Image (cartoon, helix red, strand yellow):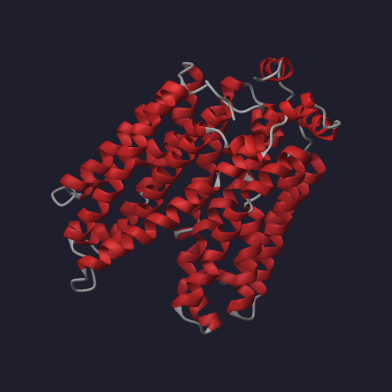
Amino acid sequence: MKGDTETDMNDSPRDSHRWMIFSTVCLIYFFVYFHRVSTSVIVSDLLRAFDTDAAALGFMSSMYFYLYALEQPLVGHLADRLGPRRVIGWWTLTAAAGCILFGLAPSIGWASLGRGLIGFGVGGVYVPAIKAFSLWFRRKEFATMLGFLMSVGNVGAVIATTPLAWAAGNYGWRSTFFLIGAVTLALGLITLVFTRDHKGSQLADSVASAPESGESLERRPGAFHVLASVQFWVIALIFFGIYGTLVTLQGLWATPFLMTALKVDRIFASNLNMVIPIGVIIGAPGVGWMTDRFALKNEKTLTGILVVYALTWSGILFFGASLEAVGMAVIFLVMGVATGGFITTLWGLVRETTPSETLGLTSGMLNPAPFLGVAAFQVLTGAILDRAGQVDGLYPLSGFRDVFLACLVCILACLVLSVFLKRHVGRRRF
């Protein structure tokens, strides 16, 4: 049970410094998504610069995701112990060092090290941000603020496409990353020098440093307590399935599928694929605002969103071959809106059912699930398509139908889990 201290803390008037926190975190989070997809548009530049092959380049790019996912429990623990400001600030400085090293890299090995530092650095932003927002903003404001954070991140992903390609073409990719590193360095220093943690973080620190009495242990449960929660695993599985299917489609198979189904070129298909992150930009704050404004139950909202998400996949599976570009764009837009709302609502549910003093730890232990989902579904769907074989350099529609059917089955399983979650939420907290 949450104590009276947290209730008062979430319902009392807020210090205006929260907007400094919110603005700084959003600017930093812009680069989290930017770096997640930034290498895709400079592949040819990197191949020439390092005289390497696609396998080595893929390994270099993957360093971001491996270190990002592996460090999440540590980041969550440190956010609880040290406070969000220190974690975000020092990790952002690490990302800045990674950007500069990446720009200076004389070989693919050094570039991999730089990319790894970037992934490690930006991996210390999202979970501490959840912790900070939960302390600085009222409970009824949390979903809205988290939604705006997700929107800013997806704007970073959009900027990492054509605008980054333009900058790399005009100024060189090395100079571009030097500039990004300088901006990131400035943001890290601003976080450390000009921002402060909420007093709720100090309360959590005092609890952590208290003698290990039975009361202290009860107020600050550890990782084993979180892992023993059925609710934790249900949320993790839902996150695994929904985010895994979405990013596998958006980041891997949407463009070749559209080329096959609509008989369009790569550029047109890529532009159509960009509708998904645009939908996320709209849906994350929109659904968050509606949830806060009308006091919607997060568990019921989550189930409704998953119904819509399942319908979009059904539309692609059963009507994808007959839809025109406009129809596909509508489906992709709705899919993006649903995904943005899903992420906002899911984290709102986690925040609602987790004591603030362990929110960082719980979030950190939960956050690897979506990245593991992406890795698993990309391997699974790739194997399914390989069984279908290629025709003139593209996979046939029959192969994509099998892929989408497998994804839809998983999404429906997640929908069933959300119904279970709706019936049992709140009976046991993390």
Q: Position of residue 105 (x, y in %)?
A: 64, 76
* Residue, far bottom: 51
Q: Nearer the viewer, residue 209 or 161?
A: 209
Q: Position of residue 274 (x, y in %)?
A: 37, 51
> What residue lies at 26% left-to-right and 63% top-to-bottom?
385
Left or right for 394, reference 27 = left
> What residue lies at 72% left-to-right and 26% top-to-bottom?
218
Q: Is 71 situated above or below 413? A: below
Q: Position of residue 203 (x, y in %)?
A: 80, 27
Q: Position of residue 150 (x, y in %)?
A: 52, 40
Q: Is 293 situated above or below 130? A: above
Query: Where is the N terminus found, in terms of image quarters?
Result: top right
Q: Nearer the viewer, residue 95 or 310?
A: 310
Q: Is residue 22 visible?
A: no
How many numbered discs sit on the rendered protein?
A: 0
Q: Is residue 136 visible?
A: yes
Q: Is 340 situated above or below 268? A: above
Query: Where is the C terminus found, in terms of image quarters?
Result: top right
> What residue lies at 64% left-to-right and 68% top-to-bottom?
114
Q: Nearer the viewer, residue 287 or 62?
A: 62
Left or right for 307, reference 24 = left
Left or right for 245, reference 312 = right
> What residue lies at 46% left-to-right and 23% top-to-bottom?
424
* Residue, far left: 322
Toward which corner of the image does residue 179 lie, by quadrant? bottom right
